[in-house]
Amino acid sequence: MRFAYSPLNIAILTALASQTYANESQISEEIKTNTVSMTPIEVEVKAKQEVGKTVYTKEDLEKTPNSSKNITDFLKVNPNVQFSREQRSADSQAELRPSEISINGAQTYRNKFVINGVNTTNNLDPLASGNSYSGKLDGGSQGIALNTDLICKLELIDSNVSAAYGEFTGGVVNAETCAPNTEIGKIHGSLTYDYTESDWSRYHFTDEEEAAEFEDPTSSNNKEYKKHGLSLNLYSKLSEQWGINSYASKRESIVPVMSGLEDRSKVKSERNNINLGTTLFYTPSDTIKAKFGFDLGDLDSLNFVDKRINSKSISNTETLTFFGELESKLNNSTLKQNISYQTLSQARENDSTTGILWKQTPTKNWSSNPGEGATSSDIELHQDTFSYSLKNAFDTIQIGNSMQQLSFGMGYDYSKIAWERPNDAYMYNQPKTFTSSSGISCTAGDILCDEATDENNYQGQYQTNGKYYQKGKVNIDQQRVHTFIENTSTWDNFSARLGLRADYDSLSKNLNIAPRSAFNYKPLKNDLLSFTTGWNRYYANYTLATELQDQLAFLEYNLKRTKNQTEDYWTQTGLSDLILANSNIQRANLKTPYADEIVFAINSQAKNWNLGLKWVNRDSKDEITKNRFIDPTTSNTIDHFEYSNSGKAKADIYTLTLRNTLPVVYKNSLHGFNFGFDYTESEKNYLDYSESYNVNSNTAAEDRDIIFNGSLIQFNERPVENFNQPWTARFGWDIEFSNLPLKINNFLSYKSEYKDTYKLKNKVEHDGVLLEAYATDTIRPRFSWDMRTTYDFNFAKDYKAIFGLTINNITNRHNIYTTPGISESTNRLRSEIGRQFIADVTFKF
C-alpha cells in the first residue's frame, strides 16, 4: 500500500530535515532539567546491572522503537525474552493487547507482572482456555496493559531471583510510574500523541489466498485500521513533605471489517485501552517515607463475527488497584510495608443469547456460510484481592572479615473469585434440509426451522442438535500466605546470597518450600572479571481456570430435537444425567508446578565495555495438563476430562551481551551500542493447561491417518512446534549529536531459520481415501531493522516539543512465519508486516 503523507507526518519530516543550530549550553541545561524532573523517587543514578536483573530507565523506554507502547513490546531488546512467531504479524497490527512473552523458555502465563509494588498478573484464565460458549474470554497474562509513556523505571528479573519474589516460573517484570523530584511549587509534565494507520504500512503475501484476505478484512485479520493514542503525565513537588504524580492515557484502534455478507458492507470494530492513576508521596522526616494512590487499566474491544448477522459483542478487562507503601527507618533496620486492594474484572456481552448456523439457501443468503446471533455466551468474571506484605532489611554488620546483611518478610493475600453467566445461551449448528415434497413443515413460531416455500425454491431446513448453556454462578475463595528469609554475605572478593521461601495456597493446600542462592566471585577484586552462579527453585502461580472448570461443566447440556423432526420439541441431556463418576472435569490432587534453575555467568568490564556470557538451565516439572478419557464401550457418549501433573519441560538458554557503559564520541556525535545473542535448546511434552488429549479411545482423533512429508503416519506422531526460536541476535545503536537536537535510535534483530510443520491446503489421496496432508519446511531467517528518530524544538523557557518518527522494518523485507500450534485447520505460512511508519509528538513543560 502507498504511504499516506498526512499533515502531521509532513510536519515531522520537515522538522527532521531542517538545519537548526541550537546553543549547546541551552541544550545541556534542557537535558539536565528534564532528567532531574522525571527521575523515579528511589533511583537518582542509573542502577547497576546485575546478573539476572536488567533495569531500564525512562530514557531507555523513550528512545527504543515501540509501536505498541506496551511493556512486552519494549522487552524485545532483552535476549532472555522470546515472543510468539506471530508477534509482528501483518494481520494483527491494530491490536492493543500486549503480546505474550516467554522468559527463559517458560510458559507465557508463568510470568509475574508488578506495577507500583502490586501484583497485576491475570491468574484467572490468562490463556482464555474455555471454549467461546462456556467460558472463554479475551484474556492475557497482564491485568493492566500499561502505556510505556507513563513509566519511569522498568525492571526485568529473569534468573537468580531473590526469595522476596514468588508465584512464577518464568520471570518478574517490575514497572514504576514517575515520581517528582523538582523544585517546590512547580508543575511539570508531558503530553504525547502518536498516530499510525494501515495506509502507512506495506504488505507482502505468501500466496494468493493470503492476498485475497486483504480484500476482505475481518476482526481477526486487521488489514484496514487507524490507531492513535494520547497520554498525559503531571508531577509536582507540592512542599518539602508532599509530592504528586498523575497520569492518564487512552489508545484507540478503529478497525473497519467486512461483514461477510453478500452486500459486502463494512462494520466498525474498535479496540480501546485506558490507563489512569495518581500517586501521592509523603516524606515527613528522614526516617519515614510513604506513598499511596491508585492505578486503573481498562482494555476493551468491540467485535463482529465474519459472515454472521447480529453478531456484535463487547469484551472488557478492567483492573483497579488501590495501594499504599510505608518505609520506616528503625534503629538497626529498614521496614517496608505494602497494602493493596485490587479488583480485576473480565466480561463479554453479546447482542443475542442465541446463535444459529444455517446452510445457504435463497432465504439464508447473506453469506456463503450464513449464521446469525452470538457465537458465545455472556460471561462475567470478577476477582477481588486484598494483600498485605512486609519486608525488614537489617543494616549491614561486620562479623569477622565478612559483611552480613539479613532480611526477612511475609505476606498474606485473600481473593474472592466470582464467575457468572447472567443469561441462558443456546447454540445450534446442525441444520438438516428438506423439500416441499417431503411433507414436512415447520411449526408456527419455530425460529429453528426455515419453511420450504417458493421463495427459497422449496428447499427448507431445520436444526436437529444444539447446546444449552445454563445461567449460573460459581464462587471461589482463595487465601495465600508466604514468608521468606535471606542473607547476603561478602568476604573480600566473594559474595553469597542464601534465601528460603515458603508459600501456602488454600485451594491447592500445598506448602511449597523454595531454596534460593546466588554466588559471585571476582578473582581480580574488581569488575574486570566476575563469575556468578546460582541454584534456585521457583513455584508457579495458581491459574484459577482449572478450579473453575470443576463446576462450569455442570451448566452445559446437549440438545436434541425429538418426536416429529420439525416439531419445536427438544430434550436435553446434561452431565448430571450421565454417570457422575465420569464427571466432565475432574481435578486430581494437583501439585504446584515448579522449575529448578541453574545459572552460570561470566562478566567482564574492561574500560568502556561490559561483556556478559550467561547459561540458564530450567527443569520444569508437575506442569498441569488436561487429558480426555472416552469410554469405548458406550460409543463415546460418556467422556470426561481430568487434570494432572504430567507436564514436563527442559530448557537451556545461552546468552551473550556486549554494551558500552559511556557513549563513544566521534566528532560531533555520541554513540551507544548494545548487542545481545541468545541460543535456546528446549523440549516439552505438553502445550498448556487447556490443551486436551484423548486417552483410552478406540476412535480418538489423534489416531487418525494423515500424510506427513509424503508418508502415511498417525496424527499424534507429527512433530510438535517449539515456541522459541533456535537463536536470535539483537543489536541496538543509539546516536546523538552535540550540535543538533536530533537523536537516531536503531534496533536490529535477526531470527534464525527453523523447521516447522504446517497443513497443506489440499488433501492427498491414499488407497482411494482423501487424507489431510502435512509437510515440514525450513522457514527462512527473519531480519528486521527498526528505527526511531526524534527532533527537539525549544519554543520557550521550560517548554519544548519533541517530534518523533518510528519506522519498523526499514528495508521492507518480506518475513514469513508459521502460525503457532498444529491443529486441524491452522499452522499456515503467513507474512509479517512490511515497512511501517508511526508518528508522534511530545510537549514537555
Image: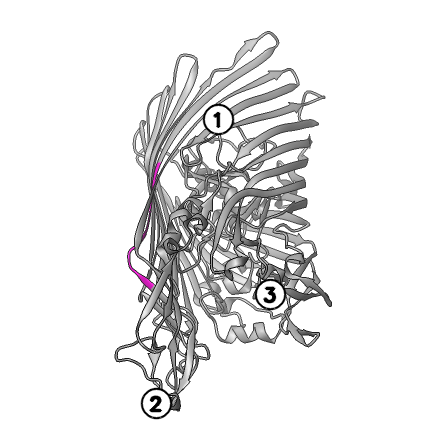
Instruction: Please give the label number shown on residue 502.
Output: 1
* Mark 2 surroundings: few (<14), some (14-19) or many (≥20) residues within 10 A: some
Above or below, 487 relative to 267:
above
**Is residue 646 shown above or below 231?**
above
Front residue of this view, candidates 519 and 818: 818
Indicate whether residue 662 is drawn in magenta.
Answer: no
Residue 346 in view of the camera: yes
Q: Secondary structure at mark 3?
A: strand
Q: Mark 3 = which residue? A: 830
What is the CA distance from the residue labelled 3 to the residue labelled 2?
A: 44 Å
Q: Magenta segment, which residues?
A: 415-425
Q: Nearer the viewer, residue 514 or 193?
A: 514
- Residue 464 position within the rendered picture, expressed as x and y whole percent measured from the top left: 39, 73
In this rendering, position of residue 778 left or right of residue 443: right
When the figure is inspected, residue 510 is found, relative to residue 368, above or below; the finding is above
- Which numbered disc covers residue 453? 2
Of labels 1 and 2, earlier in sequence is 2
